[in-house]
């Protein structure tokens, strides 16, 4: 059983994960349009991962006798200035999500809701990985600058990314 407040916060988080999926699909679309299939693949998988996060939260809330209410999802940006702009926005967004997860953890601890606290540990680890992998890609992009051969190689590398369940 979870509290109404915890249920509400997990609902909000669920909707944020779905928004994240839409944001990354929007970036996928930007890259497909620019014929950068590797970058498009990276964001397509990123979007699928976000839907997996949402699904985990959906299942958990129902497992503890709560209910998920699907809310209106804001439209993400559809215009991006550059490749780096996409990754900078991704990093900024992931930082917001990390903050949001930390808020959930704090609430779970305040309530002595140790089940939800344990459930959230997976997301804490996931956010560390998310931020660190985006930062690493940003560094690579800075090194690449306007070297199109290097960009071609990175695009090829990102084409190899696969979805891990
Ligand atoms: Fe997520
Ligand atoms: Fe994420």
Image (cartoon, rainbow, N blue to C red):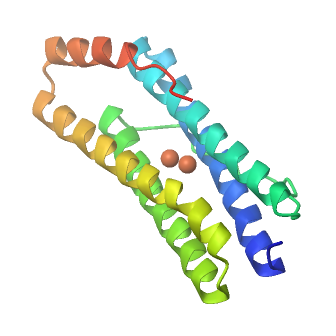
Question: Can you say whether 121 is above or below 136 in the image?
Answer: below
- Residue at the image point whose x is 71% and y is 55% from the top: 14
Residue 78 visible to an observer of this rendering: no
- Residue at the image point whose x is 51% and y is 24% from the top: 163
Where residue 106 appears, x then y in whole percent?
Answer: 55, 80
- Residue at the image point whose x is 66% and y is 69% from the top: 115
Report whether 141 appears left or right of 4: left
Of 103 and 84, nearer the camera is: 103
- Residue at the image point whose x is 86% and y is 64% from the top: 66
Of 59 and 39, nearer the camera is: 59
Where residue 10 appears, x then y in whole percent?
Answer: 72, 65
Where residue 70 appears, x then y in whole percent?
Answer: 85, 53
Of 100 and 108, nearer the camera is: 108
Quadrant of residue 145 within the rendered picture: top left
Image quadrant holding the N terminus, namely: bottom right
Residue 62 visible to an observer of this rendering: yes
Where residue 52 appears, x then y in whole percent?
Answer: 64, 38
* Outermost residue to the bottom: 110
Of 125 and 18, nearer the camera is: 125
Question: Can you say whether 52 is above or below 71 in the image?
Answer: above
Report whether 64 appears left or right of 37: right
């Amino acid at each position: 059983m979870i509290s109404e407040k915890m249920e509400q916060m997990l609902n909000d988080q669920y909707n944020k994960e779905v928004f994240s999926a839409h944001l990354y699909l929007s970036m996928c679309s930007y890259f497909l349009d620019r014929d950068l299939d590797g970058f498009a693949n990276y964001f397509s998988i990123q979007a699928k991962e976000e839907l997996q996060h949402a699904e985990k939260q959906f299942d958990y809330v129902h497992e503890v006798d709560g209910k998920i209410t699907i809310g209106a999802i804001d439209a993400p940006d559809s215009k991006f200035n550059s490749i780096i702009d996409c990754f900078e926005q991704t990093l900024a967004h992931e930082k917001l999500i990390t903050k949001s997860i930390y808020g959930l953890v704090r609430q779970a601890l305040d309530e002595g809701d140790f089940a939800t606290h344990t459930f959230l540990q997976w997301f804490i680890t996931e956010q560390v990985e998310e931020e660190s992998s985006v930062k690493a890609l940003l560094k690579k992009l800075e090194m690449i600058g306007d070297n199109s051969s290097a960009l071609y190689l990175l695009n090829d590398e990102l084409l190899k990314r696969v979805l891990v369940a």
